[in-house]
Amino acid sequence: MRRAILALAATALAVPATAAETLWRGQYAEGRDGTAWIVPCRLGKRLELVDSDAARELRALFKRLGGGRARAIFVEVEGERAGDTFRVAAVHRAQFGSPGCSEDLRRVVAKAGGQNPSWSLVFDDSRIVFHRVGDAQPASFPPLGSFAERAGRREFAAETEAARIHLVLVRERCEDPFANAVLPYRAEVRFTWAGGESHEYRGCAYLGDAAR
């Protein structure tokens, strides 16, 4: 069975090729004068936010996640650019203290993690890797096969001689206070080492570009 060390982290995406495309990732920040803006990944240009319900939601998330310490938070939003301004239509993800735009999500299907006990999962285009705190080695499941999706719910199941896993992602806003993050999916994992008892783990998740 393949082994790999993984880390749960926030992610980045290239700026949309045109202003009409809707999914953007980047850094959100606010000024002392009350202005708010987003700097999309790989654009490096500050776009001032126009007022909207979603923009006001970002302000609230910035205050809550940053706790007055943050100069910026990483976000994934739906919206549209118009010159040097940006209108946010929906907030998918917000996180303080993440790697942000330095992460590469091109081959990633999903990432997830949770606490009590701490666990993390990375699902890319070649395998799914699951790791719990205290495990000597993570469990790896190649090849992946299909990721079934229906009614806002995505599922994947796999088994090797060493272990088996069942992953469910439910499209539902999920707050992770340990990661200072608000993520778009609730994650449920049922995992069993061969010959051992099955255990369930719950946490939060987000999709990578390979899932879109």
Image (cartoon, rainbow, N blue to C red):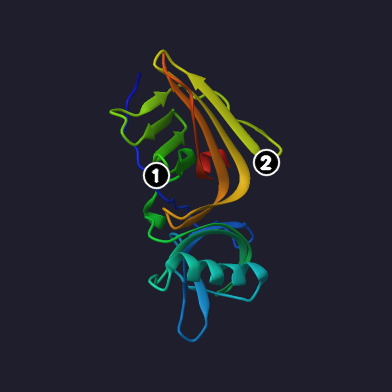
Picture quadrant where residue 74 is located: bottom left
Is label 2 in contact with label 1 (beta carbons under 8 Å)? Answer: no
Look at mark 1 in the image and give the residue it sits on: 8
Amino acid of disc 2: Gly
In which quarter of the view is residue 180 placed? bottom left
Q: Amino acid at mark 1?
A: Leu
Q: Secondary structure at mark 2?
A: loop
Label of residue 72 in the image? none
Q: Is residue 94 visible?
A: yes
Give the x, y percent position of residue 153. 65, 37
Q: Is 123 positioned to the left or the right of 102 in the image?
A: right
Q: Is residue 125 above or below residue 71?
A: above
Earlier residue among tags 2 and 1: 1
Q: Nearer the viewer, residue 181 or 141?
A: 181
User: In the displayed structure, does residue 48 sit left or right of residue 97?
Assistant: right
Please, which residue is most extreme toward the right here?
151
Q: Is residue 87 visible?
A: no
Disc number for residue 152: 2
How far from the left and from the top, in percent, is residue 104? 41, 47
Question: Could you tell me which quadrant the N terminus lies in?
Answer: top left
Residue density around tag 2, few if under 14, some if 14–19, many if 20 or more, within 10 Å: few
Image coords of residue 179 (percent x, y): 42, 53
Q: Which residue shows up at 47% across the image and 41% down it?
A: 112
* Crowd band around label 1 with a 10 angstrom C-alpha radius: few (<14), some (14–19), many (20+): some
Relative to residue 23, is residue 132 depicted above or below? above
Distance between the alpha carbons at the discs numbered 2 and 1: 23 Å
